[in-house]
Image (spheres, coloured by chain):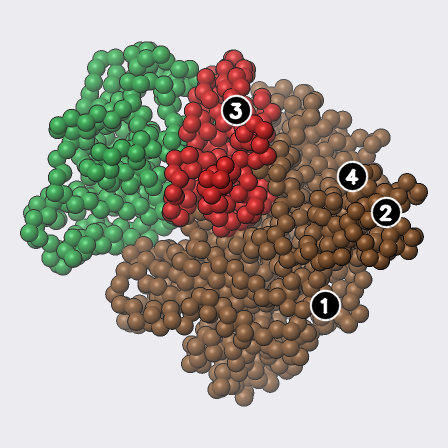
Chain colours: A green, B red, C brown
Amino acid sequence: MRANIPDYDMWSPASLDQALDALNMDPASNKPFAGGTDLMVLLEAGDLPPGRFMNLWDLNELRGVDISEKSVSLGALTTYEEIRANDFLSMNFPMLGSAARETGSLAIQNRGTLGGNIMNASPAADTPPALLVYDAQIEMESVTGTRTLPYSHFHLGYKTMQSQPNELLKKVRIPRSFEGWRGYYRKVGSRKAQAISKVCFAGNVKLVEGVVVDIRIALGSVAPIPLRCVDTEDALRGKPLTPGLIQNAIQTLEGEITPIDDIRSTATYRVRVSMNLLRDMLDSFVG
Amino acid sequence: MADAMKSEFEITVNGESKSVTTYPMGRLLDVLREDLGLTGTKEGCGEGECGACSVLMNGTLVNSCLVPALGAKNSKITTVEGLVPNGSFLDPIQRAFLEYGGAQCGICTPGMLMAAHNLLRRNKEPSREDIEEALAGNLCRCTGYMKIFESVVQALKNWETV
Amino acid sequence: MKMGKIGVSALRKEGYSKLTGAAKYIDDMQPEGSLYGTTVRSHVPRGVIKDIRFEGDIPWDEFVVVTAKDIPGENHVLLINSDQPYLAETHVNHREEAIVLLAHADKYLLEKARKHVKVEITPLEPVLTIEEARAQKEIVWGDDNHFKNFLVTKGDIDSVWAEADFIVEGEYETGAQEQLYIENNGMMARANAEEGVTIWGSMQCPYYVHKALRGLFNLPPHQIRIVQCETGGGFGGKEDYPSMIAGHAALLAWKSGKTVKIIYDRAEDMTATTKRHPSWSRHKYALTKEGIIIGMDLEFVIDGGAYTTVTPVVLSRGTIHATGVYKCDNIRIKAESVATNSPPHGAFRGFGAPQSIFALERHMDKVAKVVGLSPEELRRRNFIHPGDTMATKQVVRDNIDMDDLMDMAFKESDYHNKLKEFANQDSNARYKKGIGFASFLHGGGFTGSGEVFLASVVGVEATEDAKVRVLAASTEIGQGTRTVFSQIAADALGLECDDIEIAQPDTAAVPNSGPTVASRTVMVVGQLVQSACIGMKETLIQGGYLQESYSRSDFLRALSVYLSANGKLKTLAKYKAPKDLVWNDDTYEGDAYATYAWAVYVASVTVDTVTYETVVDDFVALQEVGKVINPTLAEGQIEGGVAQGIGFGIYEKVVWEEGRMRNNRMTNYIMPTAADLPPIRVFFVESENPHGPWGAKGIGELPMDGAAPAVLAAVENATGVAVNSIPMLPEDLMLAMDEAEEATCG
């Protein structure tokens, strides 16, 4: 343990309103703490800035999966385990289930939350690419009310987000508008389990008689943020899926991602594997 | 910088109600090992990677190194010390680990047993993939996992004969 | 009396305590009033210490502070050379070198204080790679950056090149590897002038620590006591470094008068303690057109890091295993161990052999291609046989038939059918399958005259309740020492395993049976357990307490009567070198090991050409091991070793940054999880063997040698690409496949 534990305080608000009030009064002294699967790791390494944390775990207002006719909404504290275990999500949003299943271990999945995965803002996180290709919306809550925005607009740069200090992520809402679309999710890590992504690829395509009617592509670990690849999507949208088009899209993707060399992999590998995965996805749709 | 104060928490461990006084961001792992003297739960990495500190918290498997004490307040914890049923020698999983070579150096063993429990309580017909997934959060450097898989499979049979 | 205890899977002796959480490891002990200790280290790979300052808002007067000036005896860890200080005084030679020790009762405050000790160091240019060390970019050790060199020669290597039909050269590299025992290193010490020094801790070799601390405190042997606690894995990683930590804890205890415990966290354990030596090899072979090897010219270089530690011995084992299971009349092996400014590399299962055997087996596959033979046929034409001589001119006396082992391993792995099947794969398929193998050997026990110098001793004594206690310093570190010793003793005495107690290794109570290393515990020490038991039995028989033919209860009764009459019964057995073994340390010729275990390992893999990931689908590990004492434990050894070998080959990479391990966390140093390994299928072949109890050979290290080359051969079979450097991560395979493609296109 490389942290001086007395330098870290924590309290548990009794309600969401109390949490929002506290955050509004003094955000620096009420840092949100959900499952702890990232923050406790930083603490162990002595890399967590000292301060006072607000334990969100018991706030039931941030829990639950609600299914309506138009959309499904997931409370920010929905754990990976709850995502995995939810039959509706597995049927309708299988890529989200895959992402949850491939994050950490079962013990991590029991504590790690969807909201935490988003707010921790790691470009290597596993659920954001899936959320991006499902057109997720997020609800930010504060004392002044609820603000809804497309998740694709949320991440601005490395660990910077469109969020205010007095806001909490309350819900993630996913529209039920992908009937007939085909998904492709592949996490490439350093081993089969308990791995952090080297590349995380999610694709969602509506294909009618060989024509790409609509498409979403998003990648993790290839840019400072979980990246929706709009140029590559544009290169494909509205066109028949021919070998030439596929090649063109792959080249577009190569120009759109900006991975780096780091402790887990190399930029060269990440670019190549991203391109290969795009080809693999499109080939699988043609074949 | 926050100057945290120690405070008193209630926690139920292996069926016994306990009171501990500690820092809110202290680790559940340290509460168990240092405050309650339950040293069967081990620390291998302190970052949720090796699983040696796995315990059941309110029935779900967690890494006790990643749970702050405040987060464990009023919870029910089961550690390796709580596995042996009253009056028994070992529980079915422990017995299988003993008979089939599932434990070598023993340091991953308590966590591995908790992960095996977490699996076998829910799934009485696990496939090889189910077992691999259930134990993938518990690193073992001695066994290459083969004897652990065998022990888990055998534990189910032990269970049937209990 | 029946032979009932050998060859059966007796239950693990300490299984109950490990399975219930009752077993006590060092971090499970925290005596009242004890302090925590920590280590302030260098932050540059090489430099001159200028100043040490204690800064910040820290109540420094509450702390125990130790620097080199506080050392009562000699400031170096006694092992082979006396070059490594416990605490750097003027110079640092690697980034993790200890400089200041601190102790305090509050572990949180201690960690805070550690960050406020500022050591000012004027950096010097470091040497960080084998190439830089050999080029003598800077001289960082001795006269020429070399700890030890060996030259092994047989026949006349210079004469072969002219008559060769083929000359095949290749270069091979292996990386550092972290032992990654799940229990981090830790030690606890009590030390004062009256009682001397007592150490409790996680370790493989109590008497190494004993020797090291005698020098540090300049105390007579009886004033130093070392006690091994339950130890959560070692794999070589707790062979030499524990002496350092024990020394540090003892210095803090000596100065404070209190019990001090130092437990490393994972990050510190990974950066500061030893790893497998990185290696570089060049092999150049001469062959006839029939594919017979007539000359092997080898260079083998390992990186020892900043201080000698066990490097000369690792080099020695690597060198002796470098020509493996092949016969050749003309051999030259030039072996070097060099110094760099990384933390010292040390023991890791296999001890140099996994490095040299990787190079050898990969080169054999290359040679096969050049000569136009299958990898199998090349091996078959060159396998060594009983009566042939090895590189050191040792005559093979093991009754071994490598062709037979190969046949069996290929049958179990369905090698030939798979080879055919994979040859007909669609070349455009995303997933490519391949199969490959390695054939190899591993010597048991210390090298050459090593066992003679060790002169190990084992005792057995009657306990107060008239049972039998085995006294040995050989440690249980997961491999099953206690269980196997119980079996050997029970069998030798006609008792049950439960009648045998194994003493905790404690230098105040057990004789020095040598270190727990080198695949020697069963083969060498086990034989001493057997001898000591026979001695005890003879004492009872000759004293008239026991008939030649007796039952278990006769024996226990006799023991009881003997105790009443004589007070105690203790017999010792000391190692005696087999008469027919000859070794010359100067010429490096002779019987390097009394006996070897022999093996053929076969790996099947799938390579994903989209992600360049390799998955091992099946693994057959077949070995000739003399006699299996406990099948469950023996299989466990092989399975665990193969898993580490697969890690060595395709997962585990130490990322270096200016002489420091950068990926010093379990998140970033990738060992295989339960989901990453294939079924590891273990097969034993038994044979008569005059060495070891009932002919049991050493098997601890063997499985580490064969997995990586077998997996890389399978990858080559799958992709057509030969990768000669490990670890081979997907990133490396991608580059190698690109290069191969360019070569064929361009």
Disc 3 marks a residue whose amino acid type is Asn
Measured Cα–Cα span from mark 4 to mark 3:
38 Å
Q: Which of B55 and C248 is in front in this view?
A: B55
Residue B14's disc number: 3
Residue A145, given in percent of the width and then of the height, sits at 21, 15
Q: In this rendering, which labeled residue sits more in front, label 2 or label 1?
A: 2
Disc 2 marks a residue whose amino acid type is Ala
Q: At 71% across and 31% down in the image, what residue appears? A: C252
Q: Which chain carries label 3?
A: B
Q: Is mark 3 on a helix, strand or loop?
A: loop
Task: In the rendered view, tell whether residue C277 sits above or below residue A167.
Answer: below
Measured Cα–Cα span from mark 2 to mark 3:
47 Å
Q: At 70% across and 40% down in the image, what residue appears? A: C228
Kindly tell me whether residue C660 is visible in this rendering.
no
Tell me if mark 1 has few (under 14), some (14-19) or many (20+) residues whose alpha carbon lies within 10 angstroms of its own: some
Q: Are marks 4 and 3 in contact (CB under 8 Å)?
A: no
Q: Are marks 2 and 3 in contact (CB under 8 Å)?
A: no
Disc 4 marks a residue whose amino acid type is Arg
Kindly identify which residue carries mark 1.
Answer: C690
Disc 1 marks a residue whose amino acid type is Pro
Kindly identify which residue carries mark 4.
Answer: C225
Q: Is the same chain shared between marks 2 and 3?
A: no
Q: Which residue sits furthest bottom? A: C163
Q: At 93% across and 42% down in the image, what residue appears? A: C565
For marks 4 and 2 on the same chain, the one whose residue lies earlier in the sequence: 4
Kindly identify which residue carries mark 2.
Answer: C558
Measured Cα–Cα span from mark 1 to mark 3:
53 Å
Residue C351, given in percent of the width and then of the height, sits at 61, 58
